[in-house]
Image: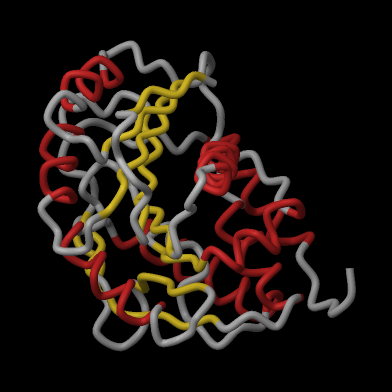
Amino acid sequence: MEEDKASDRSSPQVAVILPTYCEAENIESLVHTIGDLEVNPTIVVIDDSSPDGTGNIVRKLQKNHSNLVLLTRSFKGGLGTAITDSFRFLLSLPNPPDYVVTMDADYSHDPQDVPKLLQKAREGYDIVVGSRYCSGGKVRGWDFKRLIISKVANKATAKLVALPISDFTSGFRCYSRSYIEEILPKLHSETYEIQIETLRQARIHNAKVTETPITFTNRKKGKSKLTKNEILSFFVYMLRTTPKRSE
């Protein structure tokens, strides 16, 4: 994994992780939008050598964004390893951020909600989940079948993971640095099951978890990259998850 970043940037309190594969249509606008937020974030784009030139766009943006980091992987890895690789990079900094936000790079997550997640995290929570299914949360652009599958999966996961939240599969989250430091060695997910694994570890370690409502909008440009194999691995992990308290 290659790191490309500005050398004169001191590490701020907040980092935003953007896993990318073929997001050339979205990444420039998204970087500008996140950079304009009043939270002074470091933006970490972890790109799996996208053939559409996503990485090249980020390199050009770095000329005017000293807070922009590009991590390039030579292969198309899964979401789970993208997140854990980014966690490791951020913890390796001389001054790691106090909070780390993960979100999609296709505008399905509204960057304007980042400060809302941070506000909740600063109240002392280890994980704040941007929730589609709590009071005030919404989903736009999904057909009925996809919405039902998602809600059923979350209901089933709630029984297995046993945390007081309603959206276990949302990837829009804010993590505290202390929690990442504690559970990173225990994370082994390669794909989308990382969303459940991080919450499962939160239950095991009695971490403080909450959620705040967001509006999820089905991706505006491009096509979904969630494959059948990734869906299968997600549900296999969900079925393996048990409410044990000791590991």
Q: Is residue 9 above or below residue 197?
A: above
Q: Is residue 136 left or right of residue 228?
A: left
Residue shown at 40% from the left, 38% from the top? 19
Count up the numbered dots.
0
**Front one among 119 and 228:** 119
Residue 100: image location, x then y, percent: 43, 58
Residue 32: image location, x then y, percent: 11, 42
Residue shown at 33% from the left, 47% from the top? 104
Residue 233: image location, x then y, percent: 66, 44
Q: Is residue 147 left or right of residue 228?
A: left
Q: Is residue 230 above or below residue 169?
A: above
Query: Quick one: quadrant of the N terminus?
Result: top right
Q: Is residue 219 above or below residue 71?
A: below
**Front one among 184 and 231:** 184
Residue shown at 37% from the left, 49% from the top? 11
Residue shown at 76% from the left, 76% from the top? 204
Query: Quick one: quadrant of the C terminus?
Result: bottom right
Name which quarter of the figure residue 49 lies in.
top left
**Front one among 16 and 171:** 16
Q: Is residue 234 left or right of residue 245?
A: left
Q: Is residue 212 left or right of residue 245?
A: left
Q: How did the renderer colour the structure?
A: secondary structure
Residue 67: image location, x then y, percent: 26, 41
**Front one among 113 and 100:** 100
